[in-house]
Image (spheres, rainbow, N blue to C red):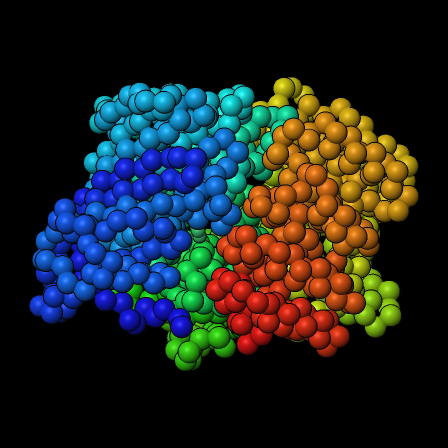
Amino acid sequence: APILLADYTPPAYLIDTVHLDVDLRADGTVVTATLACVRNAGTAAAATNPPLVLDGEELETLEVAVDGQVLPASAYRIDAETLTIATVPARFTLRTKVRIQPDANTQLSGFYRSKDGYFTQCEAQGFRRITWFADRPDVMARFTVTLHADKAAYPVLLANGNPVGQGDEADGRHYATWEDPFKKPCYLFAMVAAKLDVLRDTFATASGRTVQLAIYVEPGKLDQCPHAMEALKKSMAWDERRFGLECDLDHYMIVAVGDFNMGAMENKGLNIFNTKYVLARPDVATDVDFENIDRVVAHEYFHNWTGNRVTCRDWFQLSLKEGLTVFRDQEFGADTHNRDVARIREVRGLRAAQFPEDAGPMAHPVRPASYIEINNFYTATVYEKGAEVVRMIQTLIGREAFRAGMDEYFRRHDGQAVTCDDFVAAMSAASGFDFTQFMRWYREPGTPRVTAASAYDAQARRYTLTFTQANPKASDNAPYLIPIRVALFDAQGQELEGHSRTLLLTETTQTFAFDNVASAPVPSLLRDFSAPVLLDYPYTPAELTLLLAAESDPFNAWEAGQRLATGLILEATAAIAAGRAPVWPESFTAAARTLLTGYEARGAAFVAEALTLPGEATLAELLDEVNPDALHAARNGLRRHLAEALHAEFAAAYAALAPTGPYAPSADQAGRRALRNVCLGYLLERDAPAERQRAQDQYAGADNMTDQFAALAALANANAAARPAREAALADFYQRWQGEALVVDKWLAVQAGSRLPDTLATVQRLTAHPAFDLSNPNKVYALLRTFGANLVRFHAADGSGYAFFAEQIKALDARNPQVASRLARCFDRWKKFDAGRQAHARAALESLRDHPGLSRDVGEIVMRALG
Ligand code: ARG
Ligand code: ZN
């Protein structure tokens, strides 16, 4: 049965303090928990002496005691998910002793084994897999933890907070005690018992305190830690500067683990990270990896205030911390890398993942109203659309008022578990802005579509823009409050002074007038992507070409180019489906040439983005029925056309952008590499041995993973004649990097994402390769999720991709439902395809639905997909 936001009730009992004693033994780990419990006086139920009901999962209960008295089995009831004690005093101490089996924990939720030791993941509901507890974020307690383990095997014993004791015990064992001075919900609990190397540093806060920093990694990997450490210090300094938020801890630790379901976790003072977002060295990590590490380290650090100091009342409020923290990490990324390109990439990501989600069976509001399995709601909507909603708040009230709103939020709610309404109320108090209508963004699923029309009255020198909004997925037709940044340009590409504004669309249809406009202008709408909407305006190719060349807002300049390319690719898709040859107008080629030859002025990073055509998944969303083969052929046709028409320009830019000094992951260098590798990709579209050689030379000569991998990827997607070169490069790459797990992931992904026709067979073969491991989430994501996102190959007309996928999901579901469920999402858009494909997809989904023992996680996705 679904869990409903409307059913929220406060906890019947609160827990003030928690003492955990965790004893790691060969036959399992014994956890003794001592909880100081108190009836929650503020609730209606308090007068009725409610029973104590705690959450637990896969716990072997050894003992239950209240106020020191061991209870007979008849005094409590245990079922699959709860421990119930019918009568307890208003204030009491509960002691439970359970045994858990971390070595058998393949779900990687709770306390589990990985290569170098034991780690935890408690968000959202993993803590109940460690001990009996009120596993909900509005129960906040102060934790003290003592770990005992074999000293030689697990020399590092960590938990949240400060180390307050340690020592040796009999039989070569040792212990460590940690005390967290801050109360926290149990989802922020963490502990580690492992053999790890550590990189240490310190950070001096603005107020003059010293924070001890430590990054723990697999032995031998210390030389891959410095970038993450720098990112951590940069994040701490940035949050002080931008938001006046200082680190409140004496110890801030990051632990990297190779088996991890998600990206990283913000446990108080003891972040646990997927190795993917910690480890980097120029020869093993790409520019994008370096930047992602910055962003994720910052994200988890920023949670210390937005998530930990102020947390969520319940899981429906997840975007309270995630949307806000993504917005913060985006701003950090923009400030520390390249703001223009950051925004473009954010929107590209939103359109590739969130728009399809919002249009499909998993559509849900930023604040969902119901869920079956909360882990299914760590989504692009909660995270990325949630960040867009926070960004709109800043757009509406301005940066200064937003900062005042943040201050007000912490002034009101520090130490509390609150709701999205509380956040917006603080913003409203600080700015005076009325957000009543705006709250619709939190409430409704679906992407609003805004249709714009313009009129120019030469006599009156008046220009008008009329906007109409609609969202068929919403529960009613009420309008959203939508900030739309606009500028006007004259026919020469000059921005008209005094006419750049942020329009507030509040009605279903609304007209805005611009006076003293000398001639019919070209409007630039939704600058900087000021709202997460689909915007229709009948631009002519000439107008888009003008904006691409003249717009000073980099997002909208890029957007104009994407609109041009989208129009051409969709027309070509229809042509190809009808057996006609596509036509590519000279004006588009000319615009691309101008970009390419003008990269010094416009910035290589921008030009790289502008020359990257919209992705197939994004394009597919614009079609009622997708013919993936025609779409794929059309997009590649345009690439090939540009490659032929601009061969000389691509070759010249490729040569001019050659590296001049040693590698550094700086924004400037990364931009130049990105553009050079875009050029390489285009050059390889031609069937020419010289181009193959160019890629092979780059592959062999690169001193960094960015360039080496770009060459490998170009070869992996090259045409049939490049087969021998492709296979040789792939074999060499594996040979060279088989000892680096994260590089092997790249090797799997580049093959699973390949456009070659036999990709499914390759992926099937790779599932049996020693490099693949169904129990490692990174391997599963690299090989299987990449394949599931390979539009043309996953959606093969004969259903082979679907059938293969369903079997993989079943195998995985038995071990790790969270990861299986993420794979199942690849079926989301099955109804956008033709009847033949739909029949195959339905069969695959039904076989999943009927699979015995299917998890709640995958079950929810499949039931929604089947409708
Ligand atoms: N709070 C983490 C982050 O965004 C993500 C943890 C998600 N875990 C999960 N099991 N769904 O930083
Ligand atoms: Zn987060």
* Viewer-proximal residue among 792 and 665: 792
As drawn, 340 above or below 117:
below
Q: As drawn, is 165 to the left or to the right of 487?
A: left
**In x, y percent, where is residue 362?**
51, 67
* Viewer-proximal residue among 523 and 656: 656
* Viewer-proximal residue among 302 and 519: 302
As drawn, 697 above or below 645:
above
Examine the rendering and report whether any part of residue 289 can be seen. Answer: yes
Q: Residue at coordinates 72% horizontally, 45% vertically from top-left?
A: 768
Examine the rendering and report whether any part of residue 561 can be seen. Answer: no
**In x, y percent, where is residue 539?**
62, 65
Q: Residue at coordinates 53% horizontally, 52% vertically from top-left?
A: 816
Q: As drawn, is 613 to the left or to the right of 502?
A: right
Q: Quadrant of the C terminus?
A: bottom right
**In x, y percent, where is residue 478?**
39, 78
Q: Residue at coordinates 28% horizontally, 23% vertically from top-left?
A: 166
**In x, y percent, where is residue 375?**
44, 57
Q: Quadrant of the N terminus?
A: bottom left
As drawn, 760 above or below 660:
below
Q: Residue at coordinates 56% horizontally, 56% vertically from top-left?
A: 814
